[in-house]
Image (tube, coloured by chain):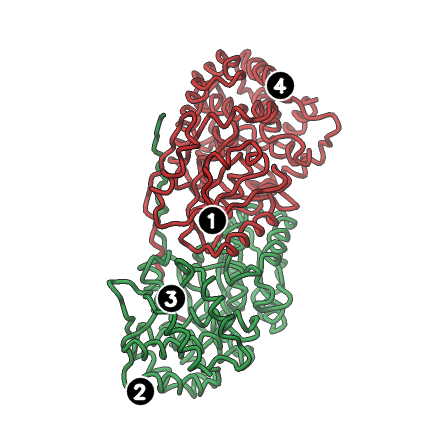
Chain colours: A green, B red
């Protein structure tokens, strides 16, 4: 018997730039071309973003191969759409010298990022998020993926963007329900990492809801700083990055059980209240904290309870399939004060007894 | 406008072990369990390997969730099989604490590696190659992928194994055609990196063809050393690693044009002769070199010409879709002497005029 070692050299660290502003879209293309001079671009967007005119504003009449996801939304976030995207790239004779440009919300970014990650073993992706959700959360951090018939993001890869451009003006065309749901991720950022930011959102909610560009840019900076710091510290989600999953364990289950009729942010709102109730059960609450959280979510108009018709047993079964489950039960992210994660022995995702979860699900009615 | 930088920390370098021996399979499972104590295993194999008894030998009656690819071979190496594998893993309630074990030839290793790369954003894979092709080549190096309806490995990822176990005894059950075709990759290793190894194969070909265990272990060591060194130097195929594609540019096109009725090694044999003819056109040949190469390939019984019924225009069109194509034309890997790659300005993949390729394709009849 003979043994030999093969070294796998590490990837070099790198940096990418997030650019935040208003009315950026019409002047972006020359900047992207300047950054990726030898690459050919392929734009992925969806029918809503295209109908809102953003694709036309970005391309300015240039003839660039594109893929418009139809229908828009979670219903298309599956491997069949990924296959259609990859084959469209091949039919455009694109090679490894391709840069994928993702123009849209969270599902567009997740799908375009995943397609870029697996197209001919990986090409760069530029993220141009156009929703509150994507600008606050999904465009930064490199998580990409699509759903299987069994669970969310069953297929996926870590694939960090080569650049991110946040144009808050694109939010002006977003429908009200999408707009409000996406703000839940910003609230989550305050809860897990920055009490002052939570209070800023609380105090400025009227300006936020009227989509005032200055506060939107301020929020984008806070969101990207918080998320960027966490991702830098733990890009592959070994531990600390799990804090970003606050409200997401039960939130994902609720989203899935609704057959994606609930928007991601709406389901996460329920998940955040669920986390608050679990915290109460485990002695981690502060007086009035959960009421303040419920208050801001109710003002947003997002759900704070599990829908009446949703079966608890179905939720429990989905939790057992959670992609972070170990021995068929997930861990949970909790806070012990506003802006601070509760850690157990240095771990950011902690054990919660199944009985507590079952009790909390009954309270969420 | 506001700009901020996000750092993406590099992945740490790591090492994995290749274990080479005879009659290893029946004692492997406890070693895998010892290395991946907290992980649950999922075995991926194909119907040929299972029918040969290797799955049973590996598992020794243990109850381990498995997926048997049917039918075996390139015809199954597509995204539909990947989807079936991932959903089987989900239905077995597997999470991120999974280790995928790939037991089989090149297509099993490529598919299992790709499934591991994208299952819940990536889990480790142990490669146990059971064919001459996989033991010589594909089990080491981290290239994974599946074909689209348009081209080979259109979907893929770089995903290095966590360990490789090469049991040359598994080659005893391999059918003669597969066995011989896989040896072409070993010949390629000699041609690109080690003239003495080429001469060893040339002089020991009878013992190799009677599957004498000692020479098979010696070859495995040479193959893994050559491939391991190249992959260490350039894991993501920026330049040097391209030398492993010797014979593969035209070889892949021939393989694809045959609708995968030709085995990979058979098509690469044609590609190696094509490279020799291109070298002659470009003044890179040595007296007698191409005759020696043709001689050893003919003794193996693999093709050295493009099949009569294969359309040259189809081959040219496939070359334009090559995943390494830039501006719709691939670069080529050539040697200027036995065991040495021809470089142009330090580049391992070089420009070859389309007219030369067209002329060479006519000569390959």
Residue contact at pointers 2 and 3, CB within 8 angstroms: no
> Disc 4 on helix, strand or loop?
loop
Q: Which residue is mark 3?
A: B3
The foreground one among B195 and A103 is: B195
- Label 4 and label 1: CA atoms lie apart by 36 Å
- Label 2 and label 3: CA atoms lie apart by 37 Å
Q: Which residue is mark 4?
A: B301
Q: Chain of mark 4?
A: B
Query: Can you say whether A42 is above or below A208 in the image?
Result: above
Single out the mark in the foreground, 2 or 4. 2
Q: Which residue is mark 1?
A: B117
Q: Chain of mark 3?
A: B
- Of the 4 image quadrants, the one containing the N terminus of chain A is top left
> Disc 3 on helix, strand or loop?
strand
- Label 2 and label 1: CA atoms lie apart by 44 Å
Percent x, y for residue A50?
Answer: 61, 69
Left or right, A91 with respect to B241, comes to: right
Q: Are marks 2 and 1 on the same chain?
A: no
Left or right, A51 with respect to A16, comes to: right
């Amino acid at each position: 018997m003979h043994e030999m070692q093969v070294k796998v050299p590490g990837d070099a660290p790198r940096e990418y730039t997030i650019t935040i502003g208003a009315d950026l879209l019409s002047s972006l293309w020359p900047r992207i071309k300047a950054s990726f001079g030898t690459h050919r671009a392929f734009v992925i967007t969806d029918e809503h973003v295209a109908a809102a005119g953003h694709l036309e504003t970005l391309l300015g009449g240039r003839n660039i191969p594109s893929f418009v996801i139809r229908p828009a939304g979670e219903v298309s976030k599956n491997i069949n759409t990924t296959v259609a995207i990859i084959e469209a790239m091949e039919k455009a004779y694109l090679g490894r010298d391709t840069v994928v440009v993702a123009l849209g919300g969270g599902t567009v970014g997740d799908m375009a990022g995943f397609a870029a990650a697996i197209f001919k073993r990986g090409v760069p992706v530029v993220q141009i998020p156009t929703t509150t959700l994507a600008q606050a959360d999904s465009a930064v951090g490199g998580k990409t993926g699509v759903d299987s018939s069994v669970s969310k993001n069953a297929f996926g890869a870590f694939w960090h963007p080569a650049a991110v451009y946040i144009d808050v003006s694109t939010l002006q065309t977003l429908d009200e329900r999408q707009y409000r749901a996406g703000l839940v991720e910003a609230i989550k950022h305050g809860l897990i990492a920055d009490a002052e930011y939570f209070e800023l959102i609380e105090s400025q909610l009227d300006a936020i809801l009227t989509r005032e560009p200055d506060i939107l840019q301020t929020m984008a900076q806070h969101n990207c700083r918080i998320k960027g710091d966490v991702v830098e510290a733990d890009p592959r989600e070994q531990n600390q990055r799990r804090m970003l999953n606050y409200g997401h364990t039960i939130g994902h289950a609720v989203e899935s059980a609704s057959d994606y009729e609930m928007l991601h942010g709406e389901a996460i709102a329920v998940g955040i209240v669920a986390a608050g109730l679990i915290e109460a059960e485990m002695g981690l609450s502060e007086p009035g904290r959960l009421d303040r959280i419920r208050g801001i979510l109710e003002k947003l108009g997002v759900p704070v309870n599990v829908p009446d018709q949703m079966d608890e047993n179905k939720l429990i079964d989905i939790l057992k399939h959670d992609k972070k489950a170990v021995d068929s039960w997930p861990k949970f992210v909790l806070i012990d004060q506003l802006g601070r994660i509760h850690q157990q022995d240095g771990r950011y995702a902690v054990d919660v007894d199944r009985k507590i979860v079952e009790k909390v699900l009954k309270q969420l009615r």
